[in-house]
């Protein structure tokens, strides 16, 4: 999409036997969302490459009368694409996946609500209980936090540890990680609100990430702590054109005030 | 010396032949991992010590494994002009006897397995001679009689640590022919017409994959050999690399030339130290002869192979996880497409083939596609090496034409159950495969027919189970393996297998219920249908097949109160 609307060709696709117009090359999951066709998903984020790990968005792609189960986040729209999103088989597998999630993240309200919406209210599997879980028993290992940290922020402060059923996400060796900029993009992107952090005084404490402590920048005007210092540096160093000197050290609020005052000053007095 | 002309190659061949048939007694000790495990190296050292100390006119070499692992350490004694004799279960204390008899032109009769008068190396023919009338011929031993050796043609007969011996029996002649007299497309065409299918498990046509890689846009490309064999009970690839490493290198060289690729990689697990050692040595020797490196055979073609060792994760046998591991990342599969042929190692188009697939290439070029496709069955040409293990009498490395029945492999070659017990089932394809009951042993072993009965070829492990084996416990064993090897990326594999294991533990402990059996089945189907990569998609097969064929064993474990 550009500012002037779609640059791509519109094509006809079939979803659950109904025909729709869709933009060629678009991720099918997004198309479905736009068309209000409900497909549950937990690991897709527009800013990142499709990952296909949560398996909840599995739909049937119909080719020559044969169906193949494929995650909707990995299908690209093309002319004649035919999709079934709610066959009994899909619903059956999806329900069981929800049961697995309910057992894996028993404390997650998001998972519970989403599962309930699809008619799954309890699990037949043994619930995972981890004492003092830094992710509060809510993590579903979708990897969004790791991918945001590595691919978007370029920080690599957290990653997967161990493998298979023992996989967890944290900092290397569960120690405070000086690489962490405290941007909290991980918490922002987490679909189950599993990541916790807290701004205390002049520090941000990433409680989920081994209590990694990141100093916050102080506003040169109001003396309030407002954003992680390292993140500020990173952002300010990358701005093109550079931000004007006098607002570099201000918090957003003071910045707004200063600019407003300047603009007001420009209005000719009548 | 660099080999550049046919004369160069032929002079090395003659030299190599002299090493194999040195005009004095030659003793070869089976020193693949199987031989070493039962004292092969100790035996080699002892014989070496005696030969050195007493200055005997004997040539002593290490050889690979001739396949009859049950009878290791196997020793071959070749007396000039006489048939080569294979001795079985030779140990250190037999060393002196073997040497003194060899010097007299004889062998210890209590250790005799069989004799070989002449041997078809396919790339060459060796005549040893006659004599030893009372010793049975190789073809008379049932374990060998029903086999057809194409991949294992040199195993156990030549010294894998000496390139001269490989060239001596016609090795590298196929690559010389390919590079100097064939168009790259003609090579691909030959491989396509041979019908060779990938030996890693899925059976994708190898020639077609080569063609796709060749046509993929981009200058920089890779060919990779998948030597990450990790199925429990499977060790064919290890043995192929330990016994005849140059066969693999030659196959890769021909493939590289056909695809126009200049860099090759062998991804091998670190748990195979001897295979790595022998491959490294083979690479070094091939480079010295100019068979790898710049301007190979004076054709202007450059190609070299590097070794990438993995840390032994089963999931790294999956192509995209393997590529990630080579790049130094965690071995986790990614979504396909794009396939490796499009976006592989370091983002470049990559052709990935299993060890055994590469090993088939030299003979296809040497003997031609129609010779090759006459072996095996239609659509399933050539031979396949299996490691026949478990509760079978004759444990070992078995090579048969595709389409041979399981019955023939397990009874004719394997001689049925060990210790006279009844065979009940066989597991093919490792943790991705299934258990086939004895009543389906007429099934021909090929890619399609194994799929039909719920299992798969896999890389070629055959684990035999007898009457004493509990099939539920077998299923539990494989799920435990697969769960431990899951990368943890997608929920059905990570969580699903874990819960399958918990349920199976419950059933095996006698605490399961009929609901557990139903839940296990339901969960197996979801894991199979919704997992991201082949590991998860195939991991429930051992459960599903044992449920299909041995459901009564599950029911027997449910207590009546439950």
Image (cartoon, coloured by chain):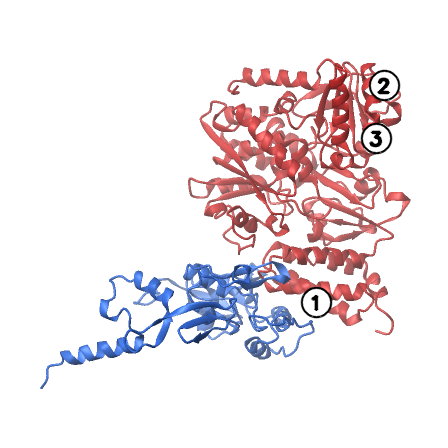
Chain colours: A blue, B red
Q: Is residue B512 above or below residue B542?
A: below
Q: Is residue A243 left or right of residue B195?
A: left
Secondary structure, mark 1, is helix
Secondary structure, mark 2, is loop
Q: Residues within 10 Å of mark 3 (few under 14, many from 20)?
A: some
Considering only order in the chain, which callout, 1 or 3, is on the residue closer to the N terminus? 3
C-alpha separation, residue under disc 1 versus residue under disc 2: 62 Å
C-alpha separation, residue under disc 3 versus residue under disc 1: 47 Å
**Residue identified by numbered label 1:** B522
Q: Which mark is residue B141?
A: 3
Q: Residues within 10 Å of mark 1 (few under 14, many from 20)?
A: some
The lab-note entry on whether marks 3 and 1 share a chain reads: yes
Q: Residue at 41%, 61% (x, y): give it.
A: A152
Considering only order in the chain, which callout, 3 or 2, is on the residue closer to the N terminus? 2
Q: Nearer the viewer, residue A245 or B428?
A: A245
* Foreground disc of the pair 1, 2: 2
* Foreground disc of the pair 2, 3: 2
Q: Nearer the viewer, residue B486 or B551?
A: B486
Q: Residue at 74%, 17% (x, y): give it.
A: B58
**Residue identified by numbered label 2:** B132
Relative image position of residue B448 (x, y in whole percent): 68, 48
Secondary structure, mark 3, is loop
Q: Which mark is residue B330?
A: none
């Amino acid at each position: 999409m550009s500012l002037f609307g779609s640059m791509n060709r519109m094509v006809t696709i079939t979803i659950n036997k109904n025909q729709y117009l869709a933009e060629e090359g678009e991720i099918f999951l997004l198309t479905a969302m736009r068309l209000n066709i409900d497909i549950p998903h937990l690991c897709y984020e527009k800013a990142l490459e499709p990952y296909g790990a949560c398996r909840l968005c599995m739909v049937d792609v119909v080719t020559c009368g044969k169906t193949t189960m494929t995650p909707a986040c990995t299908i690209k729209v093309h002319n004649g694409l035919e999709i079934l999103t709610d066959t009994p088989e899909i619903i059956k597998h999806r329900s069981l996946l929800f049961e697995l999630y309910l057992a894996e993240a028993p404390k997650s309200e998001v998972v519970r609500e989403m599962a309930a919406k699809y008619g799954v209210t309890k699990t037949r599997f043994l619930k995972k209980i981890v004492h003092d879980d830094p992710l509060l028993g809510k993590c579903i290992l979708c990897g969004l936090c790791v991918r945001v940290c590595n691919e978007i922020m370029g920080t690599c402060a957290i990653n997967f540890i161990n493998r298979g059923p023992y996989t967890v996400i944290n900092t290397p060796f569960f120690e405070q990680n000086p690489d962490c900029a405290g941007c909290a993009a991980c918490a922002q992107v987490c679909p189950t609100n599993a990541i916790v952090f807290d701004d205390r005084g002049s520090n941000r404490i990433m409680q989920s990430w081994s209590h990694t402590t990141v100093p916050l920048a102080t506003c040169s005007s109001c003396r309030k702590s407002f954003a992680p210092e390292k993140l500020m540096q990173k952002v300010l160093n990358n701005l093109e054109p550079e931000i004007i000197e006098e607002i570099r050290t201000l918090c957003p609020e003071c910045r707004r005030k200063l600019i407003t005052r300047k603009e007001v000053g420009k209005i000719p007095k009548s | 010396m660099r080999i550049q002309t046919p004369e160069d190659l032929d002079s090395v061949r003659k030299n190599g032949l002299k090493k194999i048939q040195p005009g004095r007694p030659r003793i070869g000790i089976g020193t693949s991992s199987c031989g070493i495990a039962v004292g092969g190296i100790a035996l080699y050292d002892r014989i070496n010590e005696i030969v050195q100390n007493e200055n005997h006119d004997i040539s002593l070499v290490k050889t690979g494994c001739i396949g009859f692992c049950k009878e290791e350490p196997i020793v071959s004694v070749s007396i000039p002009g006489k048939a080569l004799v294979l001795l079985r279960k030779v140990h250190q204390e037999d060393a002196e006897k073997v040497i003194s008899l060899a010097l007299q032109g004889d062998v210890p009769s209590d250790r005799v397995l069989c004799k070989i008068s002449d041997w078809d190396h396919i790339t060459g023919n060796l005549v040893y001679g006659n004599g030893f009338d009372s010793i049975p011929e190789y073809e008379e031993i049932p374990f060998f009689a029903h086999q057809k050796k194409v991949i294992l043609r040199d195993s156990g007969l030549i010294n894998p640590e000496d390139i001269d011996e490989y060239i001596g029996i016609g090795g590298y002649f196929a690559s010389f022919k390919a590079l100097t007299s064939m168009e790259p497309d003609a090579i691909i065409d030959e491989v396509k017409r041979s019908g060779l299918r990938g030996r890693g498990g899925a059976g994708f046509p190898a020639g077609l994959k080569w063609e796709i890689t060749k046509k993929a846009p981009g200058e920089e490309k890779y060919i990779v050999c998948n030597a990450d064999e990790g199925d429990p009970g499977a060790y064919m690839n290890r043995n192929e690399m330990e016994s005849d490493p140059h066969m693999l290198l030659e196959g890769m060289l021909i493939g590289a030339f056909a695809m126009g690729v200049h860099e090759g990689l062998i991804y091998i697990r670190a748990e195979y130290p001897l295979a790595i050692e022998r491959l490294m040595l083979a690479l070094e020797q091939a480079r010295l002869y100019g068979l790898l490196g710049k301007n190979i055979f004076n054709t202007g073609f450059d190609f070299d192979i590097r070794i990438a060792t993995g840390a032994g994760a089963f999931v790294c046998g999956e192509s995209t996880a393997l590529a990630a591991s080579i790049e130094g990342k965690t071995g986790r599969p990614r979504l396909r497409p794009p396939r490796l042929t499009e976006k592989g190692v370091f983002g470049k188009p990559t052709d990935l083939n299993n060890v055994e697939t590469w090993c088939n290439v030299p003979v296809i070029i040497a003997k031609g596609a129609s010779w090759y496709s006459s072996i095996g069955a239609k659509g399933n040409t050539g031979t396949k090496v299996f490691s026949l293990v478990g509760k079978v009498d004759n444990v070992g490395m078995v090579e048969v034409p595709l389409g041979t029945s399981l019955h023939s492999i397990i009874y004719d070659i394997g001689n049925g159950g060990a210790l006279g017990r009844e065979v009940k089932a066989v597991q093919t394809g490792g943790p991705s495969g299934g258990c086939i009951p004895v009543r389906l042993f007429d099934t021909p072993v090929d890619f399609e027919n194994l799929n039909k009965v719920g299992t798969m070829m896999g890389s070629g492990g055959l684990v035999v189970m007898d009457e004493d084996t509990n099939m539920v416990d077998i299923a539990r064993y494989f799920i435990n393996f697969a769960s431990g090897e899951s990368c943890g990326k997608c929920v059905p594999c990570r969580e699903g297998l874990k819960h399958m294991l918990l349920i199976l533990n419950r059933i095996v402990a006698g605490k399961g219920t009929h609901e557990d059996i139903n839940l296990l089945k339901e969960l197996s189907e979801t894991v199979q249908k919704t997992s991201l990569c082949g590991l998860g998609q195939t991991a429930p097969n051992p459960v599903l097949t044992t449920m299909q064929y041995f459901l009564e064993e599950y029911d027997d474990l449910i207590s009546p109160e439950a």
